[in-house]
Image (spheres, rainbow, N blue to C red):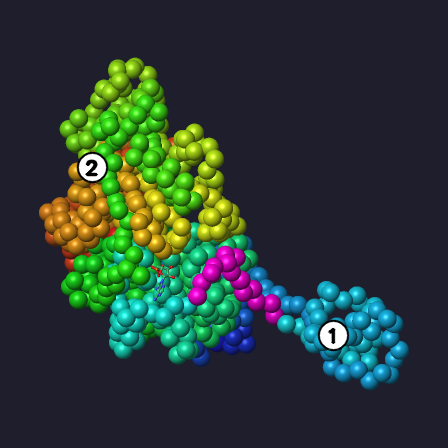
Amino acid sequence: MYLLTVLLEIRSLDQEFSYTAMDDLMVQVGMRILVNFGPQKLVGFVIRSTKITDLSETEKTLGYELKPILGVIDKKPILSPELIKLARQVADYYLTSLISVLQSMLPLGLKPNTNYRHGPKEQFATFYEFILFDNAIRLTPKQQELLDLLKSVGRLPKKMVKPTMIKPFLEHHYVRAIKEKITSTFKSEVVLDYVKPQLTEEQALIVEKIHAAPRKTYLLHGVTGSGKTEVYLALTEEYLRKKQSVIILVPEISLTPQMFSILWTRFKDQVSILHSGLTPKERYEQYLHIKDTPTIVVVGTRSAVFAPVNNLGLIVIDEEHVESYKQDVTPRYHAREVAKFRVDMSGATLLLGSATPSLYSYSRARKGLYQLLELKQRINEIKLPRTELIDLHQLSNLDDQSSLLSLPLRQKMKVALDNREQIILLINKRGYASFVTCRNCGFIISCPHDGYLLTYHKADRLLKCHHCEHVELWPDSCPNCLETTFASSSFGTERIEEEVRRFFPEARIARFDSDSTKTKTALSRIIKGFNQHEFDILIGTQMLSKGHDFSRVSLVGVVLADYGLNNPSFMSGERTFDLICQAIGRAGRKYQGGTALIQTYNPRHPALIDAVRQDYQDFYLKEMMLRKLRHKPPYTFLIMLTLCAKELLLLEDFGGLLQSLLRTNASGFTVSELIKPYHDFMKDTFYRKLLLTYKTQVQKDEITQIIKSITLPRKLTLSLDVDPSDDL
Ligand code: ADP
């Protein structure tokens, strides 16, 4: 008999339970089981199993009676001991429950959840396989046709053959029926004219270095178009040759088709794909396929870091600086951190790549915690595009026809279209801020003190600066044209599309944002269409600025760079720098002479100036200085506590109490004032936050202890975010 340690499917029950199982049930760690829990039947997940000989002795030691499990769901473990260990480490680091991590590691059909009690269903297909033909029976012409076909192809799927036709063949053992498990391997939907290139000297040196000293964490810093992807591919080839699996993470679903097609061109059905855009059935099948394949390459988004590959050799995180690697719901993990845990545990290699590494990773590389590798030249020494900041305050850049598309941008667009070159227009549409614009000339109201765009707050009908304390009323007249009608608007991609159509009615335009790319097919259609020059202009959000390799793009326009800067988070400079650098990198990738135009109301902002110069070092040093002064990461670590309740009084009282509790016990860590977030009231619920800043693991442990010791009022919820990507 076995004593099982079990986690139950209820996430808030962050507790282990014990049950027993008889030997013949063959329960193993990593399987799901069914148990009685009070009056309910629940699904549990086995995390430990110990053989016991004497039940009553064990019960005596434990001090309670043990119940047997009701049944076993899985025939084989769905998570390996290594992945369970990883889950535990993730749960400990992110101060969250182990079951919530396990739940998010598994595809829908395999989650420990009452709705999925029936275990993985394997799908089979039947084939008729030709054995021999001895002329013992006379065949009709149709049967002769079938026989010829069978002889030439060897076998046919059952569903292609009429039962009456095949019956005599079966009876005389001319064919036999065989059943085979169906595994769904994906085929590339995007066709690329990809040819494996000879590595440049710089690329080859990097591959060699990693090869010579694996089992480390590397940061590959290479400008856009310097051939990082080729480095990943060359390494993947090496690892596959050594019969080791590779996981390649890309920041967004929109980038998976492209990466997948390149990988597929080179490694065919050794490649698998895992991301949330797949249907539950596809994810489920891919998961099982990965688990059952000895060596495989998995390409996917954030959660693919948990892919159940065998014999892991390498994890690549492309565009490692992108924030989508951090999950914004529980468990709030960052794929980079999880990958680090995973490679440390398994002795694999981690390769982080970026043109604009996160300050987090770059500072680690400078300290020697990661090994820094650099690709300094763009392939074929193609120069980065000529880049200019267009000051939207300068009236000579605008006319009365448009406030969105400046004169220089429109001129350059016309030239590109005349030359049959492609254009990308980008908008940094982070957040929901809306601005106030003059209906007549399109002038946008900005802060008289620091030039940032003022944000319109509907609730109190005030225009506020998010950088200083400036607040003003809805304007009487436009400072530019003196007209008196205004509109509050936020530029969306649709609005830009309208404007572009007005000026360039002939141009073929596609829009690429989360609305237009909800489905996988829509997404690959747009990418494929743009690659094949079915569109001249692609308009998109920051999704578009990353990773895509469109060769005919000669002009990139950032319609308004200020959205990011308008955000007072400690990350806003870094985000804007990244966006602009990445955007610039999209222009002129295959031939000389690309141009990038960045429209802004803040042409003197240091992050913009450095981005235009593509001066990462200067940006890094300045930004690090600011972070140090402000006690922000990577100099410190943060934990964000979010409290929410339907009663404001309860929320604020408890918030104050928690704050003073933390403050009285704080030894070295700091506790913010109770923060009222920008969205402080949603769906009948009020929100408040507390930001904790700490420097050492000891301080983190103290924080954990204090939080664990508190009893929450019943009508209040507390959630924790370790290493949040914002501080407000
Ligand atoms: P990055 O990932 O750094 O942005 P990519 O790997 O996408 O850059 O490379 C940019 C372009 O250069 C791609 O079209 C790629 O096919 C091409 N390329 C990369 N390495 C080589 C090489 N060694 N020889 C020729 N072309 C290359």
User: What residue sits 36% from the left and 65% below the top?
Assistant: 230
Who is closer to the viewer here, 612 or 725? 612
Q: Does the magenta stretch include residue 440?
A: no
Residue 150, numbered circle? 1
Identify which amino acid the numbered label 1 is placed on: Leu
Residue 270 position, x and y percent, is 48, 70
Placement of the C terminus among the 4 image quadrants: top left
Q: Is residue 435 left or right of residue 18?
A: left
Q: Within the displayed image, which quadrant is ligand 1 positioned in?
A: bottom left
**Residue 150 shows in the view:** yes
Magenta region: 181-195
Depth order, front residue of 617/65: 617
The residue at 24%/20% (across/down) is: 480
The residue lying at 79 percent from left, 71 percent from top is 146
Residue appearing at x 55%, y 57% in the figure: 281
Name the amino acid, label 2: Pro
Residue 150 in percent (x, y) is at 74, 74
Residue corresponding to mark 2: 603
